[in-house]
Amino acid sequence: MMRAHEAGALHGQAGDRGPAWLRYPEDVNALVPSLWAENVAKSDGVVTVAGVRVDELAREFGTPLYVLDEEDFRHRARAFRDAFAGADVYYAGKAFLSVAAARWIAEEGLSLDVCTGGELAVALRAEFPPERIGMHGNNKSVAELRRALEVGVGRIIVDSFEEIARLGALATELGVRAPVMVRVTAGVEAHTHEYISTSHEDQKFGFSIAGGDAMEAVRQILADDGIDFLGLHSHIGSQIFVTDGFEVAARRVLRLHAQIAREFSVVAPELDLGGGFGIAYTTQDDPSSPETLARGMREIVEGECAALGVEVPRLSIEPGRAIAGPSTFTLYEIGTTKRVALDGGGARHYVAVDGGMSDNIRPALYSADYSCTLASRESTAEPVLSRVVGKHCESGDIVVKDEYLPADVAPGDLLAVPGTGAYCRSLANNYNHVPRPAVVAVRDGEARLLLRRETEDDLLALDLG
């Protein structure tokens, strides 16, 4: 029996042995294409994006810096739009949202999912068509619901009985009809981290199918003259690679769909199967193409509808991080390095960068894995297993848990971490009063600022003394 290390799993693995999936690189300078945006390359060891060198970006915009490949972002949006032709594709505003990104999504023909009044405000500033906006959230305020109705969002995904009552009252007050979908929990365990698994019974989202709450929610909606029932919404989680969970969820949701038709003589026109499709953060990840996902999900829905004897509803899906995630990498500058002796004669090579859990809290939040590369020069040094850490006052402030880097990485070198386009800037914070980084988009050899870097003046402006 293997004995657990007293200090925890992070410390139980010797510093010269990585996880089983991590392979010793043939060329420590080479990029792994599956981890990077399509216009990212290396030239003489320097990472470039759409022809722009990262050392130039660092000089102009500083580090840490989120660097977004705009054409890659747009290409991924189009790929889902085309693969799911005839369905509505909702971009996840919570993954990454700015005025420019909302405009790209509109231009590429996608719809937009928002979860809060703040995300809705960004969408409206971008003049995103409100009828193509869906509003999620398990505890939307009355003010958020009122604004959604006033601007005419296309659908509101209801999550509680209180929300149904609030919407009915607001719709009557405003003289409008509230377009709603019912979020249901299908009792499916997604093969992902517990914190991003959202369709098992014991969690905060949705109405239980098994417990009868979903049917009761539909009953209350149909009885309210101010509400239009659009259909059912199911979302089993995020960073999902296999379709077996979708198959089970679709089967249960479509049975509910058929039951509603029988009991209420109402055919719900739409079914949202969520998505949350996985991306490649490291070489252990093997995501499916949009075409493969679309084919598999259509086969599941069409087969189940045929078995139940019901018409196939209009589908909508939510790719989640799969559009924004791979389009962006984070650029850091190395500040210090050290070799730390471990039990059993092992050692770990620590590389500290000028960011960390303030710009990417995902490793600390749910042990997310990332990769990285030396971004500012070619190296002839041997690869050594390294741990990239941030500058914050937490031992769990880890950016990349395990990666091979050249043994000669040194202060002043630039390091790039791919796959940071989703849930990194959105979850960014000011821990230790560190200002949040800028976001720059690069296209056709030109870089432009999407979100400026916060300053100490920004932080002090919030402090009223």
Image (spheres, rainbow, N blue to C red):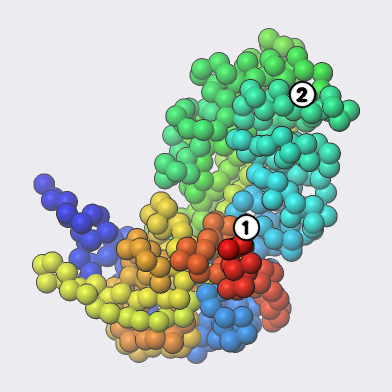
Element under label 1?
loop
Label 1 with label 2: CB-CB less than 8 Å: no
- Going 71% across and 76% down the picture, which residue do you hit? 448
Distance from Cα at disc 1 to Cα at disc 2: 31 Å
Residue 297, x across and y down, in percent: 59, 38
- Report if residue 447 is visible in the image: yes
- The mark that comes first in sequence, 1 or 2, is 1
Outermost residue, right direction?
175
- Going 57% across and 25% down the picture, which residue do you hit? 207
- Report if residue 328 is visible in the image: no
Q: Quadrant of the C terminus?
A: bottom right
Q: Nearer the viewer, residue 464 or 272?
A: 464
Amino acid type indicated by mark 1: Phe
Q: Nearer the viewer, residue 210 or 138?
A: 138
Q: For residue 408, which quarter of the picture?
A: bottom left
Amino acid type indicated by mark 2: Gly
Residue 19, x across and y down, in percent: 28, 61
Mark 1 neighbour class, 10 Å CA radius: few under 14, some 14 to 19, many 20 or more? many
Element under label 2?
helix
As displayed, is residue 184 above or below residue 412? above
Label ID, residue 168: 2
- Going 30% across and 83% down the picture, which residue do you hit? 407
Q: Nearer the viewer, mark 1 or mark 2?
A: 2
Q: For residue 74, which quarter of the picture?
A: bottom right
As displayed, is residue 75 above or below residue 243? below
Residue 388, x across and y down, in percent: 37, 71
As displayed, is residue 143 above or below residue 420? above
Outermost residue, front direction?
465
What residue is disc 1 on?
96
- Going 62% across and 57% down the picture, which residue do you hit? 96
